[in-house]
Amino acid sequence: MAKKSQNLPCSLFFVFCSLLLWSCGIEDIPFIDPIPQGNITQAMNNRAFVRIPADSPGATFTNFAVFYRIYVSDTLQASTTSTSVYSAINSTLASDYNSFSGYIDSTTQVNVDMERVFQNRRYRYLVLEDTNPINKINTVLSESSFGQSLVFDFSSSKRPTMTLENNTYTLWRSDGGGLFSPRPDRYFLNSNELSSPDNINDQINADVVNKTGIPDGGMRYTYVAMFIVAVGFNPSTYSNIYSTPSLIHVFLLPD
């Protein structure tokens, strides 16, 4: 009898393992689909078009979110649609992108805490100009945006905008929930105050990274990298979950 039990068929063993995993709730981990990178079209250094899928990314979806970081550069790139120019713009931009690129369109790097990943690289949440900017962008990029197109426009000296169908919103930089005070203001416009090394610290322009080696009086351009993720809420852990990211674009900030 002992010999017979030791020859338990493999199929029964796998059934037992499956039931064990199911009873532990492994299959109940929520999953959020990303916006595929192929849904994003980049133009020159100033425009991007994001096609939001018509179907919900997941049952726990709450909104889309955009992470960004601003980079100082002494190099003017007419087009930033190729990642090969990132090193010339700013070596930290290239390093940051390389740290995120393995997640883009990945089918294995799922259920990663992308908020932590981006914040570890000092990225911030994009917001919209409003009296309550965080709630504003979360509402705009909620389930009502399914099947629509987002257009990011940095193409003129006007304040950069995001358009969803027929509604246009002015982009705002983060202030870290009041932890720092962006100078000269919260708009995505290049200026001496924005790119000055004296202002690039945790109290003022904490969303900006300097580029060393630019001589005094040298040209100082600024670029912003933006990534979009889908966000959901895990009712089991009472915490957010995130899709893998997609690169919106690296935009040149207008003067």
Image (cartoon, rainbow, N blue to C red):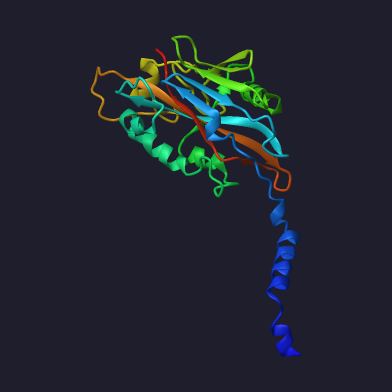
User: Eyeballing the image, is 138 above or below 30?
Assistant: above
At x 71%, y 79%, the residue is: 8
Judging depth in this view, the residue of 88 and 211 nearest the camera is 88
Q: Residue 118 location in percent, x, y?
A: 50, 38
Q: Quadrant of the N terminus?
A: bottom right
* Residue 225 % position (x, y): 45, 28
Q: Quadrant of residue 141?
A: top right
Q: Viewed as shown, does residue 55 lie left or right of 227?
A: right
Whole-percent x, y for residue 171 in the image: 54, 18
| Residue at left offset 38%, top offset 15% | 191
Q: Is residue 91 visible?
A: yes
Residue at image location 39% in from the left, 33% down from the top: 83
Residue occupying the point 28% across, 18% down: 219
**Vertical placement of residue 171 versus 105, above or below:** above
Furthest residue in direction left, as rendered: 215
Q: How many marks?
A: 0
Residue 147 point in image, percent of width and height: 66, 26
Give the quarter of the image for residue 206.
Answer: top left
The reply to whether residue 176 is visible in this rendering is no
Q: Nearer the viewer, residue 183 or 187?
A: 187
Q: Quadrant of the C terminus?
A: top left
| Of the pair 27 and 15, the residue shown nearer to us | 15
